[in-house]
Amino acid sequence: MATLIKQAYILDPTAGSVIGADGTADVLIEAGKIAAIAPLLTEHAAEPLHDVTLIDGRGQFLGPGLIDLYSQSGEPGYESRETYDSLRLAAAAGGFTRVGLLPNTQPATDSLSAVAAIQTANRAGDRTARKAHLMPWAAITLGTKGQHLTELAELARAGALGFTDGQPITHGVILRRLLEYAQPLQKPIALWPCDLALAGNGVARESLHALQLGLQGVSAIAETTALSTLLECVIEIPALVHIMRVSTARSVHLIRQAKDQGLPISASVPWHHLIFDTHDLHQYDPNLRHEPPLGTPQDRQALIEGVATGVIDAIAIDHSPYTYEEKTVAFDNAPPGAIGLELALSVLWQTFVTSGKWSPMQLWQSLSQRPAQCLGLTPPSLQVNHPAEITLFDPKREWSATDETLHSLARNTPWLNQRLQGKVVDTIIPGHQYD
């Protein structure tokens, strides 16, 4: 079956001159590949094909599939939070074609069999359903406990995306050995800079707002001291390090300096940290409890500017599902994190594109091409004869995030039952068969 998407705005710099003067084009997809793209493809171009599906893309944006750097599943161990299947469905519903899966599950993804189980999950179930491809991050340490390194080389050969524990590495010797052993493997190492001793039991960024709300604070130096140590290690051992969960203005400055020095690093910010700050904690919504905690308004502005200028390479979703019972507790006691795969594109578009702060291309690149580059992957693109890895987004379509519309098993989001503008219309994923 072939699909012809008519007159959509194209969000891919590689498309170049094949799009019209107004930025629109027709895109023909056949046998899972982009067969043609041009300012206007008449229906005659599709006549030799059978069962052509026409999609009216007018007023909609068509771009390469979105890629999430890191998100959390409940499976294995906490399937009531999220399964591989529900995660894949939720990701595709939000426009994501590939999702980096964090290893800190029960048991952790620290063995060849654990990596193989995720690879098997990608092939399981109904192939006609829209389901994102899961990319397994392998654990750095056994059980993600930070004590003993895993068999990094074996995990790399088994197809692991890269290495991370999804939590801070606090042992300096472990960090040094990790960089030494992983450097020749040429796989990304995702590290969260956080000094747990300095963070203590804090639940909010140390600020006047946190003090007024009676929330124990986490100083910004809990992040920046750990980041400075990490950068010093990379200077000596230039491995491919990705700095995850950047949350402070000072960190943006340090990363800019490190990049100016030529260090082989990339960085990402969780999307909630671009939307909220400590001003938003006044209702003690447990869905705004994050690690690292939401920053100050100054932090948030620095992060926004960091994404716009490329100092922060990409936006991560860091989808973290929890059950209703786990999350419906006092702010201080709530597990950190929120879901986001189905919501991020809509909310980010409303916040930054509709307001005119970013161009559509800027946002799309931070969610697609640049995450792929951080991971050392070939970015998806709209080029003829390339696999059709595509997201179609309607910025004017309204919808509500409800039990009926969300595919994730979890509901821990501040946007539950709220009206949103902008929705993914279709996600086309290589290797899937569509009716």
Image (cartoon, rainbow, N blue to C red):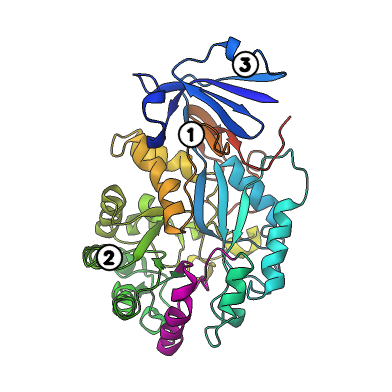
- The picture quadrant where one finds residue 239 is bottom left
Residue at the disc numbered 2: 255
Look at the image and give the residue range highlighted in magenta.
160-189
Report whether residue 266 is seen.
Answer: yes
- Residue at the image point whose x is 47% and y is 47% from the top: 379
Whole-percent x and y of residue 286?
50, 60
Whole-percent x and y of residue 27?
53, 24
- Residue at the image point whose x is 35% and y is 74% from the top: 238
Residue at the disc numbered 3: 46
- First of labels 2, 1 by sequence position: 2
Name the foreground residue: 342 vs 233: 233
- First of labels 1, 3 by sequence position: 3
Within the magenta stretch, is there residue 243? Answer: no
Whole-percent x and y of residue 22?
35, 19
Q: Regarding mark 2 in the picture, which secondary structure is present there? A: helix
Question: For the residues marked 1 and 3, what is the alpha-carbon distance in whole angstroms?
Answer: 18 Å
Name the foreground residue: 286 vs 85: 85
Report whether residue 271 is seen.
Answer: no
Name which residue type carries label 2: Ile
